[in-house]
Amino acid sequence: MNELISKIERAFAEAVYPGDDNLTDSTYGEEPAALVEDFRGKTNWRELDIEFLNQAPDGWGSALSFFSGPALRFYLPAYLIADIRNELESSDPMVRLCLSVTPAGERKKLAQMWGGGTVGEHARADFALFDGQQVAAIVAYLWWKLESVGGYDPTLEQALENYWLIREAEG
C-alpha cells in the first residue's frame, strides 16, 4: 500500500495547478460554481484534508465528476491516496476513471449543454493530459482497486482492457 502511494506521489509531483479559471468545464447547475468556490486557490493537493475531499463541493462530495481535465490531473492523486487509505466516503475515483471508457459507457451521447459528443470522447480528451508515469500510477491504482473488491469487477476490468492498459503500453 505504501509503495502504491509513493508511486502516485512521484507520478503527480510535477502536476501543475490548473488555475482558478480552469477548475471545471461545466456551467450547468449549482455544483460547478460551488466546485470553483471550494477549490479556488487550493494550489497544493497534498494539503487537502479528508473532510474537504469527502464534502467538496459544498457538501455534495461530487468534485471528481465536475473537474476539468487539467483540474482532474492536478487533484486526482489526493483522491487516489485517500481511497487507498480507505478514507473516502462519497467519492470513488474509479467511477471517473472507468465508466467512461467501457464499451457501454463510452458511446453514451452527451447533450449539447454538456458539450455534445460522447462520454468516451470527453474522457479520452481529459485522460490524454496524463503523462506515461501518471498513467502507470493510475493503472497500478486500478489493479489495487480490482484486488480490493475481490478480483472481480466488470467495469474495472473493461476499463483496464479497453483503455488504461493500452495507454500504459503506449508509454
Image: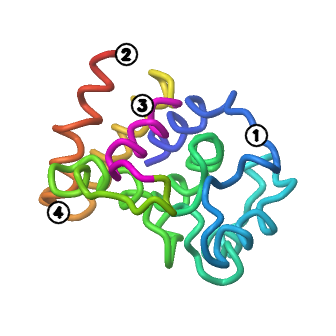
Q: Residue at 71% x, 80% y: name it.
A: 58
- The amino acid on which the numbered mark 3 sits, given as a three-letter code, is Val
First in sequence: mark 2 vs mark 4: 4
Q: Which residue is mark 4?
A: 150
First in sequence: mark 3 vs mark 2: 3
Instruction: State which region is magenta.
Output: 116-129
Q: State which quarter of the image contains the C terminus.
A: top left
Q: Position of residue 164 (x, y in %)?
A: 29, 35
Q: Which mark is residue 135?
A: 3
Q: Which residue is mark 1?
A: 17
Q: Position of residue 135 (x, y in %)?
A: 42, 31
Q: Residue at 82% x, 54% y: name it.
A: 42
- The amino acid on which the numbered mark 2 sits, given as a three-letter code, is Gly
Q: Nearer the viewer, mark 3 or mark 1?
A: 1
Q: In whole angstroms, how far apart are the C-alphas of marks 3 and 2?
A: 8 Å
First in sequence: mark 1 vs mark 4: 1
First in sequence: mark 4 vs mark 3: 3
Q: In whole angstroms, how far apart are the C-alphas of marks 1 and 2?
A: 23 Å
Q: Position of residue 78 (x, y in %)?
A: 61, 53
In this view, the residue in front, 100 or 81, is 100
Q: Secondary structure at mark 2?
A: loop
Q: Residues within 10 Å of mark 2 (few under 14, many from 20)?
A: few
Say if 169 sits above or below 34 in the image.
above
Q: Residues within 10 Å of mark 1 (few under 14, many from 20)?
A: some
Q: Nearer the viewer, mark 4 or mark 3?
A: 3
Q: Do callouts 4 and 3 mark residues in contact (Cβ within 8 Å)?
A: no
Q: In whole angstroms, how far apart are the C-alphas of marks 1 and 4?
A: 35 Å
First in sequence: mark 3 vs mark 1: 1
Q: Which residue is mark 2?
A: 171
Say left or right for 63 vs 164: right
